[in-house]
Image: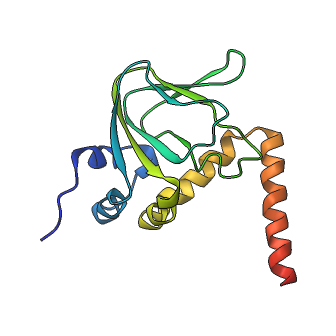
Amino acid sequence: MRTPIPTQIRALGCTPLFAGSSPRQLRRADRFCTVVDVRPAQRLSVAGERPEQLVIIVTGLAAELQPGTTVRPLRPGDCFGALATEHHSCRASPTVIAVTAGVVVAVARHELPGFLEACPSVAERLTRMTIARRSPAEQQCRAATLTSRVLMRSES
C-alpha cells in the first residue's frame, strides 16, 4: 500500500521548483522535510548568520532584504538558506521576512544530500537558481572554488 502524500508536500509538488516530480519522488523527499506554518512579519532568516537549513516557500509570500533598500520577493517554489550559501565565505545569508501567512518546508543541512537524491530534477533547478542569483563577484568566487576542486582531483 502506498503512503499518501501530505497536503503540504503535494502543494510543494505544484511549485515550479518541483514541476515534473513524481508522486514517488515527493513521498521520498517528504522524509527529509519539516513543514512549518509561518505568520506575517515572521523572520525566517537573519542576515549574516550561516543557515542550517534550506527553506522552500510552499504557500504565501516572503521578502529577501538586502543591505540598503533592495528587496527581492519570494514566492511559492522560491528558496533560501543552506544550499544558496553552501560556500559561506562567498555569501552571507540575507534577512528573509514572511509577508503573508503561509507554509514553508525546511530541510536541515545534514539532510540535503538525501533530499536532493530523492528529487534529482530539483537538485538541478536549485543549482541553476542559486547560480543565477549570485552577483558577478560571488559567481567568480564559486567558479574559483569549483576550479580548485577539479585541479585537486586531477592531481590525485
Colour scheme shown: rainbow
Give the x, y percent position of residue 53: 51, 47
Residue farthest top in this picture: 69
Place of residue 130 in the rendered image (x, y in percent of width and height, measured from the top left): 63, 46
Q: Is residue 120 above or below residue 44?
A: below
Residue depicted at 76% across the width and 38% down the height: 135
39 up-or-down from 81: above or below: above
In this view, 28 is above or below 137: below
Q: Is residue 123 left or right of residue 30?
A: right
Name the residue nearer the viewer: 133 or 82. Answer: 82
- At a point 47% along the width and 52% down the height, the residue shown is 108
Furthest residue to the left? 1
Picture coordinates of residue 1, whole percent (x, y): 12, 71
The quadrant the C terminus occupies is bottom right
Instruction: Please give the count of numbered marks on the rendered protein.
Output: 0
Q: Could you tell me which residue is drawn at 34 percent across and 38 percent down? A: 36
**Percent position (x, y) of residue 43?**
48, 25
Which picture quadrant has residue 2?
bottom left
Answer above or below: position of 55 versus 98: below
Q: Residue at position x 38%, y 21% from top?
A: 100
